[in-house]
Amino acid sequence: MGKKKKQKLPMAYKPVGFVLGWAGGTLAGLAFQKTWKVLRHEDDAPDALDPDRGWGEVLLAAAVQGAIFAVVRSAVDRSGAKAIERSTGVWPTQGTGGRD
């Protein structure tokens, strides 16, 4: 594959990455709701501004939610990148650095 095509692929991947990210966020939200229900037997996780919830509950919910979102985001990003690589023979991002 030519260098020109390799440079265009990261731009072409951006819309795909956006859709995958949106879908991953939706899946992560559903996974968090189910996980919270199993952990605390409640339908809704505590909101940080809820005066009836303690620090422990709020921070536990934030930690669990953050962990789930990070795992789902990484799995979705990696799966999408591997699919692009399998179909085009080129990794969809430039360099070896991370997202940020």
Image (cartoon, rainbow, N blue to C red):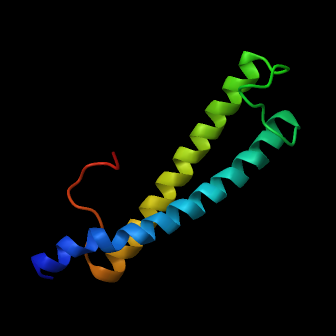
Q: Is residue 28 left or right of residue 12?
A: right
Above or below, 60 relative to 17: above
Residue 91 visible to an observer of this rendering: no
Residue 20 in percent (x, y) is at 51, 66
Quadrant where the C terminus sits is: top left
Above or below, 81 relative to 57: below
Q: Which residue lies at the image location 11% right of the left edge and 81% below the top edge?
A: 2
Quadrant where the N terminus sits is: bottom left
**Camera-nearest residue between 85 and 23:** 23
Q: Which residue lies at the image location 42% right of the left edge and 60% below the top edge?
A: 78
Residue 94 in percent (x, y) is at 22, 61
Residue 79 visible to an observer of this rendering: yes
Badge count: 0
**Camera-nearest residue between 59 and 79:** 59
Q: Which residue lies at the image location 75% right of the left edge and 44% below the top edge?
A: 35
Residue 74 in percent (x, y) is at 47, 53
Q: Residue furthest left?
A: 3
Residue 22 occupies quadrant: bottom right
Residue 7 occupies quadrant: bottom left
Residue 95 in percent (x, y) is at 20, 56
Q: Is residue 4 left or right of residue 92?
A: left
Q: Which residue lies at the image location 51% right of the left edge and 53% below the top edge?
A: 73
**Camera-nearest residue between 41 and 5:** 5
